[in-house]
Amino acid sequence: MNENQKRKLKYGSYSIILSTIIVLIAIALNLLVSLIPVSAKRLDLTKLKLSEISQVTKDYLSTLDENITIAHICITGEEDDTVTDMLAKYSELSDKIEVVNIDPAVRPTFVSTYTDKDLESNSVIIISDKRAKAVDYYNMFTFALYYTDDQGDTIFQGEMSYSDFQAFYQYYKSYFGTYYSYDTLFAGEAAITSAIDYVTTDNLPKLYTSTGHGEAELSDALLSNLSLDNIDCSKLSIVASGIPSDADCLIINSPVTDFSQIESEHLASYLSNGGNVLLMTDADNLDLPLLLKIMENYGLTPGEGYICESKDYLGQTYMVIPDISVASDTLGISGYSVVTPLAHPILINKDAPIKGIAYLQMFKSSPDAYTVEEIHDGENEGEDDLEKNEYTMGVLATVENSSKTSRIMWISSSAFATDEINNFSTGGNYLYFLTLIERMTNKSSSLSIMSKMLVEDSLILNVAQEVFWSVFLCVIIPGAVVGVGLAVVISRRRRS
C-alpha cells in the first residue's frame, strides 16, 4: 500500500468515525428531547393561551389521589393541537393521570363502553374506578351573546353552551336580525377539570327545584354552572311525589301561588329531618300563608314594601348593592358584589317556635335605606322624610338537632338569580348563589375556570388614525424608498 492509499484510508476512517459520532449525538439529542415535557417543547406563544392550564386546575390536580385515564377520542391525523397539548399538560401536572389516544376506526366499541352518546372527533372520556364521564368536543366551547341597543351600545347578555346556542341563536337572529352577535370561547379546561372532579368525588349533590306554583325557572347559564360544578338539578312536583330522600337541597324560586296542605307538610318534614331550602320571593307575591307559616316557625317573616337606598345604583334606588361582609366571611369570597333589586325586608324573630336556630344576615342594606310601597324610576319623592333603617334581604337560618343540620337561605329578591342581574354584578350574584348551594349541600369547593376567547380583540382605529396610517404606509414609506433609490442612482452617475 503506497503513501497515497494510506492517506486515503486514514481520511476515510476519520470520516466514518466522525459520521458515527454525529449520528450518535443526533440519537442522543433526540432521546433527550423526547424526555422534555410538552410544555417546554411546544410553548403557547399566542396571546390567547388556549392550551395553558389555570392555577385553579393546578391546585386541584395537586390533591388528586386516584388514578384516572383520559381517553382522547380522535381519528388519526385529525388531532386538534390545542386539545392534544392541553391533555399532555394534565398528564405532566399529575402522575395519577394517563392520557391515551383512541382511534374509533381502530377500536369502534370503546366509546359505547362508557357512554351512549355519539362523540365528535377530539372528544375525551375521563375514566376512574368509580365512574366515567364523556366530554364532547363541541362542549369544550361556549358562546358569549351580545345585544346592540338602539343607541349602538353593545350589552353582554350571557354565556351559553353549544347546544343552547344552537337552539336559541337562530331564534334571536330571525326575530332581532343584526341586533344580536356572539363570540366563541374555548372552555376545554373547565369541562375536563370538572369531569375529573366528577369521576373522583364521593359527593355528587342532588338539587331539586319545586314546580306547580308558578315558580321562575333557573336560567340555562346558571344550570350550566351547576352542571360544571357537578351538582345535579331536577324539577320536582312535591304534590305528586313528595321530597325525595336524596334531595340535598330544594330551591323554591319565586312562587306565585301557595303550597297545598300536603305540600307544606312534606316541606316541614323535610326540614325537620335535616333538609336544606333556598327560598327566593317576590315582593308582589307574598300571599303564601302555608309556605310562609313554615318560615315563621323558623323565625323568618316577610316585611312590607321595596327596599331602596339613598345612594342609587344605575340611577335606580331599588337596585340595592347590599352589605355582604358576613356572606363573604362565611363563604370565603372576596372581591365581588351582588345586586338585590326590588327586594322586600326579611324580619328575624329569635324567639321562634323552633329553638336553637343560628341566624346570619348574609345580605343587608345600609342604615340609610328605606322602604316604599310603589317603585318609581330615579329618586323617590319625599325620600328625606322617610324613616331610615338597616334591612335584611338575605338570611341564612341554621338549626342543629342531634346529628341533623337543617338550613334555610331566604333571598327576598326574585331577580337575584337571573342572567340580567348577574351581568350587572359582573358575575357576583351567580358566584354567591353557587357557593351557597355548595355550603348547603356540603360540597367541598367550586372549580371556577374562565373560558378563553378564540378571537383576539380587533385593532380599532378612528378616522384620523386611519388617514394617518394610510398616508404613512401608502405614501411616506414608498416615497422614502423611491427617494433613497434616486439618491443612490444620482450619486453613482456623478462618480462615473
Image (spheres, grey):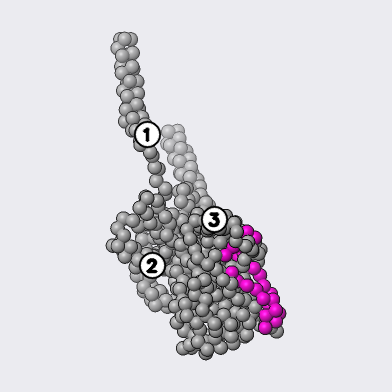
The answer, for residue 314, to whether it is visible in the render is no
Residue ID at (42%, 55%): 155
Question: Left or right: where does residue 394 sit relative to residue 217?
Answer: right
Q: Kindly identify the amino acid type of the residue bearing the numbered disc 1.
A: Ala
Name the N-terminal-most of marks 1 and 2: 2
Residue ID at (33%, 62%): 172
Alpha carbon separation for disc pair 1 and 2? 42 Å
Alpha carbon separation for disc pair 1 and 3? 39 Å
Please tell me whether residue 228 belongs to the stretch shown in magenta. no
Q: Kindly identify the amino acid type of the residue bearing the numbered disc 3.
A: Asp
Residue ID at (33%, 16%): 487
Disc sitting over residue 464 in the figure:
1
Question: Left or right: where does residue 172 sit relative to residue 262?
Answer: left
Residue 412 is situated, as x and y percent measured from the top left of the image, at 55, 70
For mark 1, give the secondary structure. Answer: helix
Name the N-terminal-most of marks 1 and 3: 3
* Quarter occupied by residue 441: bottom right
Q: Kindly identify the amino acid type of the residue bearing the numbered disc 2.
A: Asp
Sort mark 3 into few (<14), some (14-19) or many (20+) by Cα contacts within 10 Å.
some
Disc sitting over residue 164 in the figure:
2
Sort mark 1 into few (<14), some (14-19) or many (20+) by Cα contacts within 10 Å.
few
Observer-side mark, 1 or 3, equals 3
* Closer-to-camera residue (21/92): 92
For mark 3, give the secondary structure. Answer: loop
Residue ID at (60%, 79%): 295
Residue 81 vertical placement versus 440 (above, below): above
| Magenta highlight range | 345-371
Residue 28 is situated, as x and y percent measured from the top left of the image, at 51, 51
Disc sitting over residue 312 in the figure:
3
